[in-house]
């Protein structure tokens, strides 16, 4: 849209003016001779930029005025029977209007050429909607409600007013921002996280483990491990084994989608290598016999079957990661068959 291009131009010109002013300051502090030599040139550049800025700001105001004249209330059922305002969002770009539900909305860009009404949050509306944070009973989910209340407390505090709060887009934070806000929620709710705990960002059943995180006593909030499966798995910092700081194979069974990869302790891998023996199996589908390496190991007081596939391989190539499936630890020694 033309209005978006003009807004971008205004920002670019303002940034150029700021850079020249910064150059002024730098020369004044470090090189007076160069400052006096360049002063007239820089003054002229700022003068031209300010003149250009006035022109595009004037154009911007005219376009906004045109949009406002198009921003007319609709009376058809399509517009009157919805929660958002009875106006076309694309005709009211950047404007705020009251919706049919009594809440205030702003017309925002959804994608190129498409605009939509977004409900605005105010200090008063948040106070009505949000209650005190409570520690979770089972899954630890960093909810939008948690995040919004914390953002409100940080940016509004105890001021009771009806000012609009521009919230972050919680679905599109980068990794560092997500970690920062997750830590804030954990601290605010006084959640007693333990090493290996799964954490969920906004949802408990997102796509491709995108919502999944883990708590590490050593590293804090960490994300799923993607070197083996692109969807992500339990990170190798957490090991399955018999030590106090190690885990049972089924600890994360309901938390990770697409795979059940787990990493075994060095002690368990060594035990498997020392105890596996070849076993002849029969594939009822291909009618072929094949060889596996099998043994039993004990983890946290329970016995598990270990099955390793790859008849032409030997136990020296056994890896430290396995799939956990119904009481079995399964691994393929083929390079292209990880899970």
Image (cartoon, helix red, strand yellow):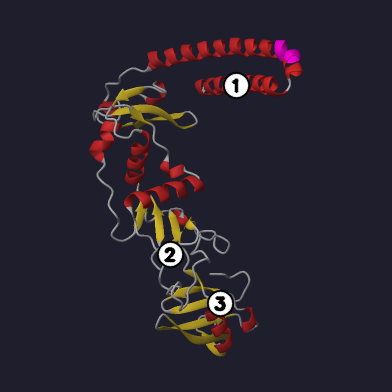
Q: In this view, does 325 lie above or below 23?
A: below
Element at label 2: loop
Q: Which image quarter: residue 95?
A: top left
Q: Which of the two discs, 3 and 2, labels the residue nearer the N terminus?
A: 2
Identify residue for label 1: 18
39 in magenta = yes
For label 3, the crowd category at 10 Å Cα-Cα, with few meaning under 14, some 14 to 19 and many 20 or more, is few
Mark 1 Cα within 10 Å, few/some/many (few <14, many 20+)? few
* Residue displayed at 27% across by 24% down: 76
From this viewpoint, is residue 71 visible? yes
Residue at point 52% right, 75% down?
265
- The secondary structure type at the circle numbered 3 is helix
Give the labeled residue for mark 3.
266
- Name the residue rendered at 32%, 26% in the picture: 163
Q: Residue 231 placed where, x, y %?
A: 51, 59
| Residue 291 image point, x, y percent | 58, 86
Report the span colored magenta: 36-41
Q: Mark 2 points at which residue?
A: 195
Front residue of 98 and 120: 120
Q: How crowded is mark 2: few (under 14 residues within 10 Å), some or many (20 or more)?
A: some
Q: Distance between the residues labelled 3 and 1?
A: 58 Å
**Disc 3 to disc 2, how far (Cα)?**
19 Å
Q: Nearer the viewer, residue 143 or 35?
A: 35
Locate residue 156, reporting x and y percent: 34, 33
- The Cα–Cα distance between marks 2 and 1, rounded to whole angstroms, is 48 Å
């Amino acid at each position: 849209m033309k209005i978006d291009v003009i807004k971008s131009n205004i920002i670019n010109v303002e940034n150029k003016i700021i850079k020249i002013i910064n150059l002024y300051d730098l020369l004044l502090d470090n090189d007076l001779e160069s400052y006096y030599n360049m002063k007239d040139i820089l003054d002229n550049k700022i003068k031209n930029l300010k003149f250009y800025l006035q022109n595009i700001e004037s154009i911007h105001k005219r376009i906004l005025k045109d949009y406002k004249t198009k921003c007319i209330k609709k009376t058809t059922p399509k517009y009157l029977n919805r929660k958002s305002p009875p106006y076309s969002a694309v005709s009211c770009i950047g404007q705020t209007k009251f919706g049919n539900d009594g809440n205030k909305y702003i017309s925002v860009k959804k994608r190129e050429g498409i605009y939509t009404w977004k409900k605005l949050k105010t200090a008063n509306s948040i106070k009505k909607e949000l209650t005190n944070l409570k520690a979770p009973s089972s899954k630890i989910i960093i909810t939008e409600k948690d995040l919004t209340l914390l953002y409100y407390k940080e940016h509004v505090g105890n001021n009771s007013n009806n000012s609009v709060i521009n919230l972050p887009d919680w679905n599109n934070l980068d990794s560092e921002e997500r970690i920062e806000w997750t830590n804030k929620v954990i601290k605010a709710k006084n959640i007693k996280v333990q090493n290996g705990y799964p954490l969920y960002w906004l949802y408990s059943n997102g796509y491709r483990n995108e919502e999944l995180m883990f708590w590490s006593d050593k590293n804090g909030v960490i994300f799923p491990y993607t070197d083996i499966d692109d969807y992500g798995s339990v990170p190798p910092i957490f090991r399955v084994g018999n030590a106090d700081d190690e885990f049972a194979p089924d600890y994360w069974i309901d938390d990770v989608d697409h795979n059940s990869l787990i990493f075994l302790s060095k002690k368990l891998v060594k035990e498997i290598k020392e105890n596996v023996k070849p076993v002849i199996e029969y594939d009822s589908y291909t009618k072929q016999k094949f060889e596996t390496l099998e043994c039993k190991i004990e983890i946290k007081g329970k016995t598990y079957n270990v099955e390793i596939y790859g008849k032409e391989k030997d136990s020296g190539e056994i890896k430290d990661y396995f799939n956990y499936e119904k009481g079995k630890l399964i691994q393929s020694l083929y390079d292209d068959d990880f899970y």
